[in-house]
Image (tube, rainbow, N blue to C red):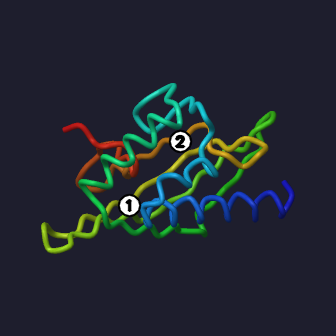
């Protein structure tokens, strides 16, 4: 795997989370494929559906922070895509409404050759209190 590919995908991942943390929904076009095979706990979503769900999520939780644990970042070449896995700490900041929520997540994603997300999923490690699949973008249905 070339260092340029790894550097490019790391940059895309970093920019993607900054975009979400800043609430720039319209910029998701730069990071997500028009149709996504898997989006956390859902399948075959359009970018438009993802944007709509993201908007609703950010209305409920407008302040978030993402800390990627870069030492865990791994890329594997697939036929014409790249499987990417990494750990991250995701925080929902309270703004005084509730106690900050902190999630330690393991993310598995697939990027195409254009370095655009075509599939993504995540889970919280089993040894933590809540085993629920946590979606940064999609509202969690309890």
Write down the residue under mark 1.
104
- Position of residue 73 measured from the top left corner of the image (x, y, whole percent): 62, 61
Left or right? Give the position of 3 relative to 137: right
Write down the residue under mark 2.
120
- Position of residue 33 measured from the top left corner of the image (x, y, whole percent): 63, 39
* Up-down relation of residue 6 to residue 44 (above or below): below
Front residue of 131/116: it is 116
Tell me which numbered mark, 2 or 1, is placed earlier along the sequence.
Answer: 1
Label 1 secondary element: strand
Quadrant holding the C terminus: top left
Left or right? Give the position of 10 relative to 142: right
Neighbourhood count class around disc 1 (C-alpha, 10 Å): few under 14, some 14–19, many 20 upward: some
Neighbourhood count class around disc 2 (C-alpha, 10 Å): few under 14, some 14–19, many 20 upward: many
Q: Residue at x 38, y 52 (%)?
A: 125
- Position of residue 132 measured from the top left corner of the image (x, y, whole percent): 29, 43
**Extreme-bottom residue of the structure:** 96
Residue 81 occupies quadrant: top right
């Amino acid at each position: 795997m070339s260092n340029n590919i790894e550097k490019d995908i790391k940059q895309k991942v970093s920019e993607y989370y900054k975009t979400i943390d800043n609430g720039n929904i319209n910029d998701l076009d730069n990071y997500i494929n028009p149709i996504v095979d898997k989006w956390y706990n859902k399948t075959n979503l359009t970018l438009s559906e993802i944007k709509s769900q993201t908007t609703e999520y950010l209305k409920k939780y407008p302040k978030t922070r993402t800390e990627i644990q870069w030492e865990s970042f791994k890329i594997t070449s697939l036929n014409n895509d790249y499987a990417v896995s990494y750990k991250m700490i995701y925080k929902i900041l309270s703004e005084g409404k509730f106690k900050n929520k902190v999630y330690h997540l393991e993310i598995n994603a697939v990027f195409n050759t254009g370095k655009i997300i075509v599939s993504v999923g995540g889970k919280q490690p089993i040894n933590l209190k809540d085993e629920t699949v946590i979606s940064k973008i999609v509202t969690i249905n309890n």
